[in-house]
Amino acid sequence: MKLPMQVDLKDKVAVVTGAGGVICSKLAEALAASGAKVALLDLNGEAAQKSADEIVAQGFTAKGYKCNVLEKESVEAARDAIAADFGTCDILVNGAGGNNPKATTDDEYFVPEDLGEMKTFFDLDPSGVEFVFNLNFMGTLLPTQVFAKDMIGKEGANIINIASMNAYTPLTKIPAYSGAKAAIVNFTEWLAVHFSKVGIRCNAIAPGFLATEQNRKLLFNEDGTPTARTGKILAGTPMERFGEPEELFGALLFLASEEASGFVNGACIPIDGAFAAYSGV
């Protein structure tokens, strides 16, 4: 695969959660192409292994592991298996996350006439909101608790969290996801300070709008035509397009490299086509 920059991650062990999905499987591929031995973790173990097999087919080192990031025992079991296969973790990419329809409103703005006609803010399922927040926040905290223990004092050890531009400007319809990603940015800063004396850096990347399976129903109709929401997104993105997963590689590899970013700690890099910078006029 073609990388935007060359960094040397030889002999490093990289752990990527949520790696059965499109974005994080690509991030895992970029780390492997840079020389790291990559462990791909996902609740869907078959998806993680499929992504790992595709990486191995390119001549790199990777293996998939079934892991529930919301169960500490499951994460610990994955850590033990990875340590036996590759060694202990040097780079942790916390990519597990996502939204859920139970935590999404049907319309952007509330009007009284919507009551009883559609799912409004007042109808959000508390269990759905809790699931979304746990998946994104606890699904980052628990793997960090488990893997960071092995990273203490290691040269070049670092944690890279996957945030979102939702963290800075909450999108309509998805309050739980936006709030959870805001928590990830804050947690990234907290971890950067907390681990600063033991050599573990912690940073994040914040993707803007990428067309993935997770948000496809929000962006495209069943016939493939763009939804009204897509029109609004592109109108608010000066580059007038969605991002591609490969466009996250530069920030990922920059942060993963001690030589390139050794004094970068507690940062969150936006990758959004200037969406956040655009005022609309």
Image (cartoon, rainbow, N blue to C red):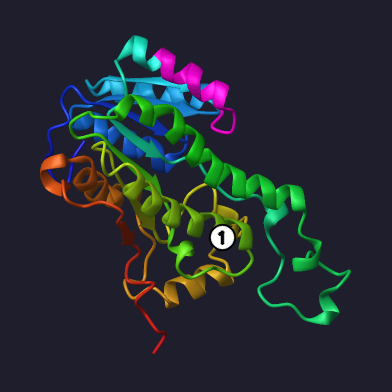
Neighbours of disc 1 within 10 Å: few (<14), some (14-19), many (20+): many
Residue 75 highlighted magenta (yes or no): yes
**Residue depicted at x 50% and y 16%:** 77
Residue 190 highlighted magenta (yes or no): no
Regarding residue 276, the answer to whether it shows in the image is yes
**Residue depicted at x 55% and y 61%:** 178
Position of residue 143 measured from the top left corner of the image (x, y, whole percent): 46, 32
**Residue depicted at x 38% and y 57%:** 206
Q: Which residues are magenta?
A: 68-81
Q: Which residue is mark 1?
A: 179
Query: In the rendered view, would you say 281 is above or below 229?
Result: below
Position of residue 153 measured from the top left corner of the image (x, y, whole percent): 24, 29
Instruction: Answer left or right for 150 relative to 211.
Output: left
Query: In the rendered view, would you say 111 is above or below 244?
Result: below
From the viewer's side, name the closer residue of 168 and 211.
168
Query: In the rendered view, would you say 135 is above or below 41?
Result: below
Position of residue 246 measured from the top left corner of the image (x, y, whole percent): 29, 47
From the viewer's side, name the closer residue of 129 and 220.
129
